[in-house]
Amino acid sequence: MKLTPPDKSIAFTAKWRQSPRSIEKKVAQFNYPLIRGTVVKDLDVKSDMWPLQFFFDGPDHDLIADKFIKATRQRGPWTVIHPVYGFHMLQLLSVTENIDRADSENITEFNTEWIEGIDPLTLLTAAEMSSQVGIRSDMTAVSAADQFVKGIDTSKRFSLSRSIASVTAKVNKYLQPIANMSTAVNKEMLDVINAQQDLMSAAILTPLSIAGNIQAMIELPLKAINDVRTRMDAYGNLAVSLFDLRPQIHELIRPGEALNKANVQQLALTSVITANAKIVTVHPAEGGLRSQKQAIEIAQLISDRYDAIVANLDETQVLFEEKRLVDQHFSQEQSYFDTALVTAKAIEFLLASMCSLKVERRMTLDRPRCPVEIAISEYGGPGNDDENIDLFIESNKLTGTDILLLPALREVVIYA
């Protein structure tokens, strides 16, 4: 079990064996004079209660336990990665440390109680908001695949195959470096690409399987890493390259082939939209975001990317506006509502969960100062394995002699 306190200064990894989870109903009871019995009204449920028992072990278990006790004094929700139920934002209610140096050698036991609160604006837990993004992503994939099947002309096999090959080449260029970070994900990617080749060389094309394979090829690399900015950069570059996949003016003389190209581009870009939404379904701190400002920037970036993709797809539709009705292409005819909603849900989750991130503070040095001294002064020490010093150097992008000494009037960033 992984437990991260509100200030994100350290993540505790504990051993867990078992623990219950309880739900209490909110039931109103009305007792009337001279009436036998009680009128009850079910008012839904309270938040889930999580009594968690876990252990720290090893030669430094007592030191880790002491750090954990000190961290419990912080205000705000904790990020908990439960070994069974995954990510949850929990508010600590009570903690008891069982100190037994006679019978529990190299082990410290904790008994804690937590409550999973809801966001005051959305009235949902962080886990529920993350789950909604996943559900909406699946619904978007279904509508986009149906749209693809409806729009393509399977008799124009060569144009379809060539367009899919272009998408595959762009995915290999921009997403394969991410997939390579995980051996398992890389193997899955190779399997999907090989399966796509088999589908396109089959005697009879199966459009729905082809659509699902394209979607899997684009979204699979997300599983390789959690870093939000790295994934956003890769998928942003992929989207820009896919903008060039729209039919050219001279290709419109063969409407069937042009429609195939437009529909392949539309399916690929729709998958990029759902991938952008899934990128933020991990907690921001797990995705490498340190401050609320960074979370807001990513939320704005997701919105801007969505607008750019929709605008590009609309431009593709305009190319066909002088064609016969049966040869026209209608942008996001079935998937527009789903892509808009999944993007909104992703931004909603990101903004609601960023409250546990630090606030970025900038200050101008009044004298020459050493980065090590600044980090120790501002963060209360060097941190485990000098992590606070590394944080200061990385967040301020210090290189060369700047790592040793910063001049006066230099502006630096501190996460408070």
Image (cartoon, rainbow, N blue to C red):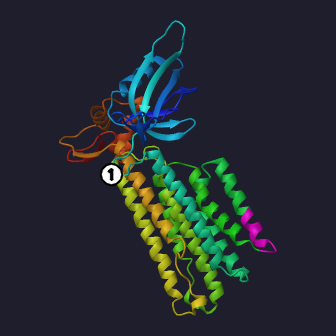
Q: Where does the image place residue 179, in percent across and percent down from the top left? A: 61, 54
Q: Quadrant of the C terminus?
A: top left
Instruction: Identify the residue at horizontal 55%, vertical 39% (top origin).
Output: 85
**Residue occupying the point 36% across, 30% down:** 382
Residue 46 seen in the current view: no
- Describe residue 75's horizontal placement relative to residue 185 as left or right: left
Q: Is residue 16 above or below residue 394?
A: above
Asked if residue 227 is positioned above or below residue 82 in the image, the reply reads below
Nearest the eye: 9 or 344? 344
Q: Is residue 408 magenta?
A: no
User: Which region is colored magenta?
Assistant: 195-204
Crowd band around label 1 with a 10 angstrom C-alpha radius: few (<14), some (14–19), many (20+): some
Seen as rendered, the residue at the extreme top is 102
Seen from the viewer's position, the closer of residues 98 and 61 is 98
- The secondary structure making up most of the magenta span is helix
Q: Position of residue 356 (x, y in %)?
A: 36, 42
The magenta stretch spans residue 197: yes
User: Looking at numbered disc 1 in the image, what kind of residue is underneath it?
Assistant: Lys
* Image spot of residue 256 (x, y percent): 65, 86
Q: Secondary structure at mark 1?
A: helix
Observer-nearest of 224 and 409: 224
Residue 21 rendering spot, x and y as whole percentages: 51, 32
Q: Residue at x 62, y 74 (%)?
A: 148
Which picture quadrant has residue 114?
Answer: top left
User: Residue most toward the right?
Assistant: 203
Number of marks in picture: 1
Q: Is residue 40 above or below residue 311?
A: above
Query: Which residue occupies 39% across, 40% down?
Result: 117
Task: List the residue tagged with mark 1.
Answer: 293
